[in-house]
Image: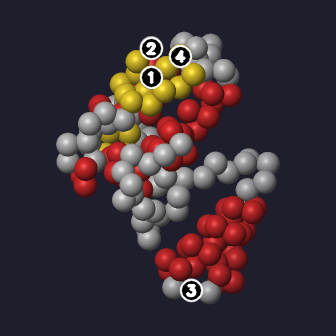
Amino acid sequence: MKIDLPRRLNRDSMYTLLQKVITRDRNPVSDELVLNFSTLSKFIEPCGVTILSNLIHWLENRGVTVDILPGEVSRWEDSPNKFLDDSMFFEQHLGEKLNEYSRVRVTTLPLQHVNAKDPMGWLSYKFTPWLSRQLDVPPNRLATIQVCME
């Protein structure tokens, strides 16, 4: 079953996507899904990346075969696929980047599945050091933020 992604993927449009993929009784609509990324043409918010990645993990954990159809990228620099590729989304879900020149941006962290049972390692060893560099403050000055996130 082919599922077209919305033109913009954010916290508002995610419900439309979820209704296409998950039944009312919270089951996948099919055992095989193809996510069509060519329809994602305008924008994807960071929360959209998280929603999409978590949805793929959720489907796969329920035995669904999920294929990704990236589509043609006409204006690569303006494409949501560029942001996804730079965040390592496609590398995580397809096993490779779409473009060999894609790189994690200085202002972002690469997509990483954080285990809900042990988020402390990610906070301590990935997020806090990254935020420290972005804000140009020592990591110990971010202790209150880290405690709030924990």
Q: Nearer the viewer, mark 4 or mark 3?
A: 4
Q: Give the spatial CA distance, label 3 vs label 2.
A: 49 Å
Relative image position of residue 58 (x, y in whole percent): 63, 30
Q: Give the spatial CA distance, label 1 vs label 4.
A: 7 Å
For the N terminus, the quadrant is: top left
| Mark 1 or 3, nearer chain start | 1
Which residue is denoted by mark 2 in the rendering? 1
Q: Give the spatial CA distance, label 4 vs label 3.
A: 47 Å
Task: State the image quarter where residue 81 is shown.
Answer: top left
Q: Answer whether labels 4 and 2 touch (C-beta < 8 Å).
A: yes
Q: Which mark is residue 34?
A: 1
Say if 129 sits above or below 17 in the image.
below
Q: Which mark is residue 32?
A: 4
| Mark 4 or 3, nearer chain start | 4
Name the amino acid type tagged 1.
Val
Which residue, as the protein is rendered here, is positioned at the far left? 74
SS type, badge 4: strand
